[in-house]
């Protein structure tokens, strides 16, 4: 990738102007499934106008396997502190597809992974942020490979027809710093959304997400919140879903 592409990837979370995130999970009868976190930055590219089209950047449509990526960089990773090595290890199950086309004003990132149990992909949004900053570098140096500290984490469970999604603040000081940094970006973030789209093997009997909508067959839950609201209150997407027996 060239410099402008590095900048776009690094700015992905910070400058999410009128951008949409979708967290999609497919769960099978045996508890296995697939998780995807998709970022659509096409509106941000549209706002950049013709200047982006003048960059002569070649279109990108590529997929990164973080298992292969971490194997390739294992010597550099081994020099990092153990705690940072463990954070990078969490990226191993994931792949990321990156699509960027300035002329068509397209930008999309999709982090995805298969799982045997949904708890294997806990804190996937944190992984998305790390993957967006690390995976966009074709030749990262040791210092560049350090995963960013995240003030929150999200955990999933699925057991006996019950699914839960819960978020918690793990670093209060860092969380407050993040809130302070959002103050100057509220105007840009006000139009951004974060949507849950969960597909279950059985019909949904009940959910704590009162404003959620459902598919015609009753097996898919869709729940959308304002991205800025989510950044201020990570628990706004906490929910429990009970399936029919």
Image: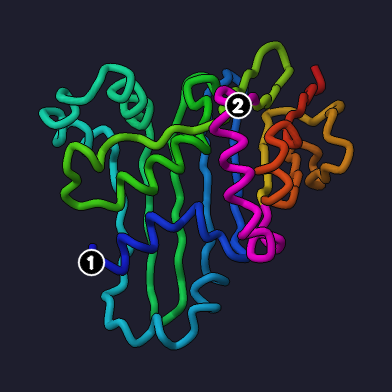
- Up the image or down, 228 lies above or below 19; here it is above
Residue that mark 1 sits on: 2
Depth order, front residue of 185/64: 185
For the point 59% across and 36% down, the residue is 25
Q: SS of the residue at dot 1?
A: loop
Q: What stretch is highlighted in magenta?
A: 168-193
- Up the image or down, 2 lies above or below 182; here it is below
Q: How crowded is mark 1: few (under 14 residues within 10 Å), some or many (20 or more)?
A: few
Which scheme is used to colour this image of the protein? rainbow
Is residue 15 shown to the viewer in this render?
A: yes
Quarter of the image containing the N terminus? bottom left
User: Where residue 172 is drawn, which disc sits there?
Assistant: 2
Residue 133 position, x and y percent, is: 36, 47
* Number of disc labels: 2
User: Where residue 125 is drawn, which disc sits there?
Assistant: none
Q: How crowded is mark 2: few (under 14 residues within 10 Å), some or many (20 or more)?
A: few
* Residue 181 placement, left or right of 59: right
């Amino acid at each position: 990738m060239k410099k402008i592409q590095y900048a776009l990837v690094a700015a992905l979370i910070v400058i999410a102007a009128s951008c949409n995130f979708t967290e999609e999970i497919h769960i099978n009868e045996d508890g296995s499934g697939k998780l995807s976190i998709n970022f659509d930055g096409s509106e941000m590219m549209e706002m950049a106008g013709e200047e982006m089209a003048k960059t002569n950047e070649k279109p990108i449509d590529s997929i990164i396997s973080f298992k292969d990526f971490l194997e390739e960089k294992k010597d550099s990773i081994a020099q990092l502190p153990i705690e940072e090595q463990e954070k990078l290890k969490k990226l191993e199950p994931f792949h990321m597809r990156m699509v960027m086309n300035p002329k068509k004003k397209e930008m999309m990132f999709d982090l995805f992974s298969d799982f045997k149990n949904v708890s294997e992909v806990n804190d996937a949004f944190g992984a998305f942020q790390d993957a967006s900053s690390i995976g966009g570098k074709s030749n990262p140096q040791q210092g560049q490979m350090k995963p960013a500290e995240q003030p929150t984490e999200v955990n999933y469970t699925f057991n006996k027809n019950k699914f839960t999604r819960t978020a918690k603040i793990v670093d209060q000081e860092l969380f407050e710093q993040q809130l302070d940094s959002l103050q100057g970006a509220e105007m840009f973030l006000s139009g951004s959304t974060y949507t849950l789209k969960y597909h279950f093997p059985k019909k949904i009997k009940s959910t704590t997400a009162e404003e959620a909508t459902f598919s015609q067959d009753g097996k898919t839950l869709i729940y959308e919140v304002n991205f800025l609201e989510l950044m201020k209150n990570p628990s706004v997407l906490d929910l429990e879903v009970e399936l029919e027996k």
